[in-house]
Image (cartoon, rainbow, N blue to C red):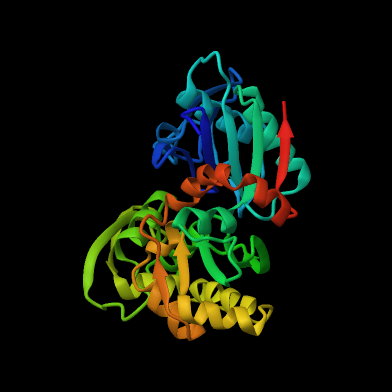
Amino acid sequence: MSFLDLGIDLGTANIIITSGNANILNEPSVIAFNRNTESVVAFGSEAYGMIGRVPPHIAVIRPLKDGVITNNDMAQELIRLCILKVIGHRLINPRIIMCVPSRVTEVERRAVVESAVSAGARTVYLIEEPVAALIGVGENILEPFGRMVVDIGGGTTDVAVTSLGGVVASNSVKCAGNLLDADVVRYYSEQYKLLIGERSAEEIKIKYANVYSPSNETAGVVTGRSLINGMPARADVSEADIYHAIREDIDKIAQTAVSVFEQTPPELIGDIYEHGIVLTGGGAMIKGLDKYLSDATGVKCYVASDPLGCVARGTYLAFKLKDSLRNGFERIAVFKR
């Protein structure tokens, strides 16, 4: 493998490109488009900083929502720009393995591949997120041993059990980071009559979310617009506030993990009980989530050492296993230019 082999995690919240053991690009999955000139103004972090701050003729777009591509044109352009930012103009085109949400359709898969090819990829492979997550954590998924992952991304939570290089049981729910942000917005609207922005909700979720023994003490403040008089206003933030905002959807994630056990053969359940459940994705960093899921499933849970980057790393490492994976995973797709 070389620098020209790239692994790409195409997530609802972030797009991460990996080569070797390092992330060489990590950008929000956001693109800004000028409707007047019909041209891209910015993408990634620059576009994310424009959310809620642009004039009407600038559209700030998230081309993926709830784990699926909702705007093919903008998704293709975002992927193309990110790849070009990494590889520049080279005589040798890269091979790429792209990690995609598990619910994307064949049409959406083809759109992803075409965007990578338009950026100069000579060969494109697709792999699903839970598989890449386990590979990135360092698990040997080719062994006859049950391994379980809960991957909590921006749009979906994917849960899977693998053994002998194949997915034995899996489930997916459209309940992840972006929905938790929306929960926080709704909570402050209902409880404090305060309308806060999407970015503010994400920031206080990251900073104060604790789903296991949250504190009632005020830890910070959030600023927004009063729904009573329309004027600027502030409200206190505590761990308990964020917990009450997100607990219903956190419970849905736990129930999704429980439902996968119902599909799993008893022998593999024994392996998982012995080895534990690994948590990956940005949502895995929520304080106390490992203990919460341990209580719900009765199985020890642990957070991957790099939960946000391990999926992207797994896509790159999949180059070593691609021949085995192509036989072991029916949904692996290979497209050549």
At x 66%, y 51%, the residue is 324
Residue 153 appears in the figure: no
At x 65%, y 68%, the residue is 171
Q: On screen, 129 above or below 241?
A: above
Residue 67 appears in the figure: yes
Relative placement, left or right, of 12 versus 51 is right
Q: Residue 257: x percent and y percent?
A: 57, 75
Relative placement, left or right, of 250 versus 70 is left
At x 63%, y 78%, the residue is 259
Q: Residue 268: x percent and y percent?
A: 60, 78
At x 62%, y 67%, the residue is 163
Total numbered labels placed on residues in the image: 0
Residue 239 sits in quarter: bottom left
Say which of 282 and 178 sits in front: 282
Say which of 239 and 115 sits in front: 115
Q: Residue 104: x percent and y percent?
A: 70, 50
Q: On screen, 94 above or below 228?
A: above
Q: Residue 83: x percent and y percent?
A: 52, 28
Relative placement, left or right, of 62 versus 24 is right
Residue 217 sits in quarter: bottom left
Residue 315 sits in quarter: top right
Q: In which quarter of the image is the C terminus?
A: top right
Q: In the displayed orientation, state which residue is furthest to the front.
A: 143
